[in-house]
């Protein structure tokens, strides 16, 4: 669920909590919420506003329920297709191959891979935390070569591009 839908869910829950407090107050004998409700539906304009708010809350509730039960379609890449059948590799499997390739290069402390399906093959985007003692152009070039080669060799995938973003440098260990 995206951050937008989570924030809508929080607001919706706050409204439900408020209504629950009003209902509990009525159950305990407090009649003031009934006065508020009578004021709310006294005029036709107030009834129209109340009905619109109620319809909006119903629509939001249904949309939230749909979002909760909607499953994400996992991205798959077709490796091979023949009369015998189809061979598919999932994104988590591709990420494991990418991580294996990046481990072959010294100086990388942390890697966050993202994989998408491009027109000419798989597009791999890597966000790296590297050791500042290594030369970044040489290191990233080596990573691009190794990732592309391993994905083609192990996964049978066409690699369109390997994008690298060096996001941070790993802190040097303290000298004692």
Image (tube, helix red, strand yellow):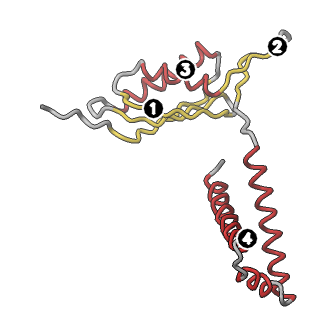
Q: Residue at x 61, y 53 (%)?
A: 3
Alpha carbon separation for disc pair 4 and 3: 61 Å
Q: Position of residue 160 (x, y in %)?
A: 61, 29
Judging by the rendered image, the residue that carries numbered circle 3 is 97
* Figure check: 105 above or below 11: above
Residue that carries the numbered disc 1 in the rendered image? 111
Q: Sequence order check: which comes first, mark 1 or mark 4?
A: 4
**Residue 169 vs residue 68: left or right?**
left
| Camera-nearest label, 1 or 4 | 4
Residue 85 image label: 2
Q: Is residue 150 above or below residue 133?
A: above
Query: Mark 4 sits on what residue?
Result: 27
N-terminal-most mark, 3 or 1: 3
Q: Up-down: is 68 above or below 56?
A: above
Residue at image coords 60%, 24%: 94
- State left or right for residue 161 relative to residue 12: left
Is the C-beta separation of discs 4 and 3 under 8 Å?
A: no
Mark in front: 4 vs 2 = 4
- The Cα atoms of the two marked residues, 3 and 1, are separated by 13 Å
For the point 54% across and 35% down, the residue is 125
The Cα–Cα distance between marks 4 and 2, rounded to whole angstroms, is: 64 Å
Compute the Cα span from label 2 to label 1: 34 Å
Would residue 70 be found to the left or right of residue 99 on screen? right
Q: Position of residue 74 (x, y in %)?
A: 70, 33
Q: Quadrant of the C terminus?
A: top left
Callouts 1 and 4 close, C-beta under 8 Å = no
């Amino acid at each position: 669920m995206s951050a937008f839908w989570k924030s809508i869910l929080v607001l919706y829950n706050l409204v439900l909590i408020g209504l629950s407090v009003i209902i509990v107050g009525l159950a305990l004998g407090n009649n003031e919420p009934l006065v508020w409700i009578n004021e709310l539906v006294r005029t036709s304009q107030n009834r129209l506003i109340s009905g619109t708010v109620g319809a909006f809350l119903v629509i939001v509730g249904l949309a939230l329920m749909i979002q909760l039960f909607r499953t994400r379609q996992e991205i798959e890449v077709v490796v091979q297709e023949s009369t015998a059948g189809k061979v598919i590799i999932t994104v988590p499997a591709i990420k494991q191959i990418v991580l294996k390739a990046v481990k072959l290069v010294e100086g990388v402390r942390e890697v966050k891979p993202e994989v998408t399906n491009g027109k000419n093959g798989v597009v791999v985007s890597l966000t790296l935390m590297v050791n500042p003692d290594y030369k970044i152009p040489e290191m990233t070039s080596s990573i691009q070569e190794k990732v592309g080669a391993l994905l083609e060799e192990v996964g049978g995938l066409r690699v369109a591009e390997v994008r690298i973003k060096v996001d941070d440098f790993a802190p040097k260990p303290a000298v004692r």
